[in-house]
Amino acid sequence: MADGAVKSSTREFDVVVVGAGFSGLYMLHRLRGLGFSVRVYEAGDGVGGTWYWNRYPGARVDIESMEYSYSFSPDLADEWEWSERYASQPELLRYLNHVADRFDLRPDIQLNTRVTAARFDEASMRWNLKTSTGESISAKFCVMATGCLSIPKAPEFPGVENFKGATYSTSSWPKDGVDFTGMRVGVIGTGSSAIQSIPMIAAQAAHLTVFQRTPNFSVPAHNGPIDPALVEDWKEHREQYKDEARAAGFGIRMVEESTQTALEVSEDERRDVYETRWNRGGFALIGAYSDLIADKAANDTAVAFVAEKIASIVKDPKVADILTPKTYPIATKRLCVDTGYYATFNRDNVTLVDVGAAPIEAVTPTGLKTARAQYELDAIVFAIGFDAMTGALTGIDIRGRGGVSMKQKWAEGPKTYLGLMVCGFPNLFTVTGPGSPSVLCNMAVAIEQHVDWITDCISYLSDRQVGAIEATSGAEAEWVAHVNEVADGTLFPHANSWYMGANVPGKPRVFMPYIGGFPVYREKCEEVAAKGYEGFALTSAAHAS
Ligand code: N01
C-alpha cells in the first residue's frame, strides 16, 4: 500500500491530540464539545502531564493556585477547593484527574501510548501517526499538546552506569516516593526542581550535598493554607480577575505589574517596595518596576536586594557568596519560588559544592568526583533540567511537506508563526509552542488562549470545508524576526538559560518564548483570526485526493 494510504487497521479521527496534560485535557473538551471526533494519546499511565511526572518531594506550582486553574468553567471553579496558596503536585494531579472525570474525558484518552511519528500525506491532506504500541492513526488535524518542559535532559556524566547506589531524576520520580532516611544524598542542579526538593531531602537524609554549577535567584513563596477570604473574593470577582490576568504581561494578576521604573524613585523607596513584595512572596518581586527586565541598571537594584537577603539568611558568608548569582540579571533565568531554600544551607547536614569552579568529572561507583574532590554518596538526584520548548516536538519523527522533518526545519532554532503553526507542516498545531508567550506567562492562561484559538480555527476551517491551513513562509519569517527583536530589547539573551537553549549541549542559542507580553500577543492572534487567518494559506478540501 502506498505511503500515506489508509490501511484497514488504521483508526481515523478528525483530530489527534498528543498529550493529556493541562493543554490536552482542555483541547479534548473543547473539540469534542463541537462534535469533532478526537483521540488523545498519552505516554504516561495517567493524565496530568507535568503534574503526573514531576513528583519529587516539595514539587508545587510557583503561581498561586487561584490563578493556576482553568477558567473556562465557572462551575468547575466554584466546586474545586484548593487547600494551599501554592498547590502541591499531589493536589494538582488530583485537580487534573477531577477535570478528566467531571468532563467525562477518559473514554477518548489512550494512556501508555507514545506517539512516535507523524507524517503529513499531501494527497489526502491528512496526518498519519504511529504509536509506541504499533498503532496507525489517520487524522485531519494534529494538535501537539506535548508541554514545554517534558523531555528531561539525560545525565551526561561519565560513569553513571557504574554507580552502586540509587539514582533518581526529579522529572520522573517514583510514584511511591523515596525514603532517604540515613542516606548520604547528592543533588545535582539548583534550578526550580532542585530548589523545591533540597529543603525536603535535607530534612530526611543523613547528609545532603548540593552540587551547584550556577546559582539561581529564588524568592520565598510564603506558602500556607489558602486564605478563605481570598477564595470568597475570587468567587465574587472571578470574571474581573480573569480579565485582569489576561491584561497582565505575564498573565498573572497577583504580580501587580507596576508602571513605574526602578530608577525614578529613591533608594529608600525602592527598598521598601522590594521588601513589601518579598514579604508578599512569589513573582511579586519582578512586578516591582516596569523596566527590570529591560534595563541593566534597574535590574541591578533587584539583584543587590536579593543578594542582601541571601547574605542575611545564610550564616556562613562563604556559602552565601557561592549561592549569590553574579553572572546574569535577575529573572532572565526563570525565577525560583521556594520554601526555606537558603535557610537549608544553615543545617549541619548540608554541604554546598561549587561545581562551577570545580566541574563534575565523573560519577564513580561510590559517589561523585569533581575536579577537586571525591564525594561518597548512597543516592544521586539529577535535577538537571529539560530539553525545553522544542525537545518534545523534535523527539517525535514529525514530517511535513516533502518529508522534511521538524528536526531539520528547526536545526538552527525553532521557526513558527505565533508559536501555533509551522510553515511546511499543514494542519499541525502546537499548544504553547516556541514563539508564543508560553513559559513567560501563567501557563494556565497561555494554554486556554491557545486551545480556544485552535478550536475556533478548526471550527472555521470545517465550516468552510477547508482542507488544509498552513503558516506562510513570509508570515513565519516575520514573526521569528519579531520574536528575536523583542527579546533583543530585553536582558533575557544575557543569561545562559533554557529559554535560550543554552542548557543543552549543541542546541542552537535562540530565545524561544515570545517576550512581547501576553496582552499584545493575544491581540495579534485575535486580529489574525478576524482577518480570515492572515499569514496562513488555506487550501480547499476539493484539492485532497
Ligand atoms: O531545570 P533547570 P529545573 N553539571 O534547567 C544544572 C519549571 N519548573 O527542572 O544553570 C552540573 O532550571 C543547571 O546548572 P546551569 C520552571 O520553569 C517549575 O529545575 O545550567 N549542573 C541547573 O542548576 C523551571 O525553570 C517549577 O549551570 C548541571 C539545573 O541543573 C523549569 O521547569 C518547579 C548540569 C537545572 O535547572 C526547569 O526547572 C520545577 C551539569 N552537567 C520546575 N546540567 C515550579 O515551581 C544541568 N545542571 C512550578
Image (cartoon, helix red, strand yellow):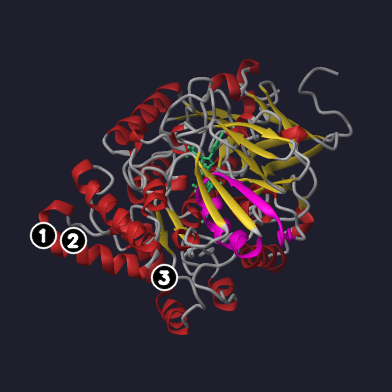
Is 184 one of the magenta-colored residues? yes
Q: Which mark is residue 239?
A: 3
Tell me the residue at 13%/52% (across/down): 263
Could you tell me how far apart the alpha carbons at marks 1 and 3 are, in whole angstroms? 37 Å
Residue 467 figure quarter: top right
Residue 380 counted in the magenta span:
no
- Is mark 2 in CB contact (under 8 Å) with mark 1? yes
Q: Nearer the viewer, residue 55 or 301?
A: 301
Residue 279 found in image quarter: bottom left
Q: Is mark 1 within 8 Å of ligand 1?
A: no
**Left or right for 106, reference 35:** right
Give the residues in magenta. Answer: 177-205
Under mark 2, the amino acid is Arg
Quadrant containing the N terminus is top right
Specify the label residue 266 is tagged with: 1
Q: Specify the amino acid type for callout 3.
A: Glu
Rounded to the nearest angstrom, the CA distance separating label 2 from label 3 is 32 Å
Q: Residue 342: tell me if it is visible.
A: yes
**Label 2 neighbour load within 10 Å: few <14, some 14-19, many 20+:** many
Q: How many marks do you count on the picture?
A: 3
What secondary structure is marked by label 1?
A: loop
| Identity of the residue drawn at 60% across and 65% down | 203
Question: What residue does disc 2 label?
Answer: 270
